[in-house]
Image (cartoon, rainbow, N blue to C red):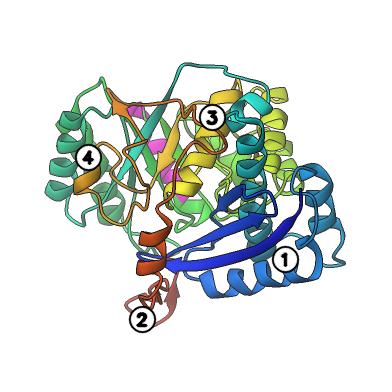
Amino acid sequence: MEITDYDLYGVPPRWLFLRLETDEGVVGWGEPVVEGRSKTVRAAVEEIMDSYLLGKDPRRIEDHWQAMYRGSFYRGGPILMSAIAGIDQALWDIKGKHHGLPVHELIGGRSREKIRVYQWIGGNRPDELADEAAQLVDAGYTALKMDATHQMRHIESRETLTEIVERVQRVRDAVGDGVDIGVDFRGRVSKSMAKTLTHRLSDLDLMFVEEPVLPEHIEHLPAIATQTRTPIAAGERLYSRWDFKRLFETDAIDVVQPDVSHAGGISETIKIANMAEAHDVAIAPNCPLGPIALAASLQVDTAVPNFFVQDHGFDIHLPASDRTYQYVADDQFVFEDGYVEVLDEPGLGVDIDRSLVEERAETDVNWHNPIWRHEDGSIADW
């Protein structure tokens, strides 16, 4: 078997899909993308495919991963690792389909029968957050995640800090104690304010506080962890096991959140999960992306023993006819009571509607992060 061709599709709302073809007619799909930099990742995928992977046997996944990573003098980072990630997903999809097995059977088999998921809640005002949280709980979710704050100054006022705590308290009051709430700081908070906020939020018994500081500042996590009883989560913006090694060395992390479309794909995410298990750390993969990335994440979740909860970026609890831009041919994400069923079809377990992908790829997708500024005109972290 050899890889004969590939296609890349930029599709709404901000996703990039990869399709690999083989001479035996087996097709694999992957999702190599960095939100807001999909065209840059596209160029990286094209370069890897054209310079190395075309003509190769897709079943030699580990060998290809090593070649894609180690074959370049400059390694790592969001663009290159996301390009590798999407290719790796497509290779596993091909291998699973070739053997007639879901990917989780090829990486160790089931560790669980269903996969707990959480949904992010938006809204700018406390009442909007509370209303959306209540709606998701009514739909069956048992875990939610919310942003702690919008932009923050290096040192904030007591009023602002109190407003942040009250936002979270409003959601807790709306859903009760039986629902887990994760609070994402998104690296918008300085180390000083992270220590203060994590301390003030401790009494709300949160599921975790995510990315209390930027990944550039993970050396401050031990000091932050001493201020709170809440589990600390991080890793969305780390891209390899070597990046995560520094995180584990802090001995201040409770949950790691690699993204299967950013952190080197299925192959690398499994290795990160294994490292986490050795450090008594849970894994809750990040996935604010599309159905291919989610399917790849669910395959990992099914197999690794230290899985905790899965992020996802679209309303899988709605009927397929009501979804927007899901691109799956059938209603394959089965959601019930806060869990998604294991994907048992061969490969990644989803059937992508190629005709719909090609149709939507005619749309000019040009999503980029907004640029935020403080009141004085200086740049704020988004």
Question: What residue sits right under mark 2 in the picture?
Answer: 376
Pointer 1 residue: 49
- Element class at badge 2: loop
Q: Residues in magenta? A: 194-205
The residue beneath circle 4 is: 318
Q: Could you tell which of marks 4 and 1 lies nearer the N-terminus?
A: 1
Work out whether mark 2 precedes mark 3 in sequence or the reverse, and give the earlier one. 3
Q: Closer to us: mark 4 or mark 1?
A: 1
Q: Main secondary structure of the magenta part?
A: helix
Q: Nearer the viewer, mark 1 or mark 3?
A: 1
Residue 136 falls left or right of residue 307: left
Q: Residue at x 40, y 73 (%)?
A: 367
Q: Position of residue 331 (x, y in %)?
A: 31, 38
Q: Earlier in the sequence, mark 2 or mark 4?
A: 4
Residue 301's disc is 3
Query: Which three-letter amino acid code belongs to the residue tagged 3?
Result: Asp
Query: Crowding near pointer 2: few (<14 within 10 Å), some, many (20+)?
Result: few
Residue sitting at the far front: 24
**Location of residue 221 in the rendering, given as x and y in whole percent from the top left corner:** 60, 43
Is 323 on the left-hand or right-hand side of 148?
left
- What's the CA distance linking mark 2 and mark 4? 43 Å
Kind of residue sitting beneath label 2: Asp
- Mark 1 and 3 residues: CB-CB less than 8 Å, in contact? no
Q: Is tag 4's residue or tag 3's residue first in the polypeptide sequence?
A: 3
Ranked by sequence position, the earlier of labels 1 and 3 is 1
Circles 2 and 3 in contact, beta carbons < 8 Å: no
Foreground residue among 331 and 109: 331
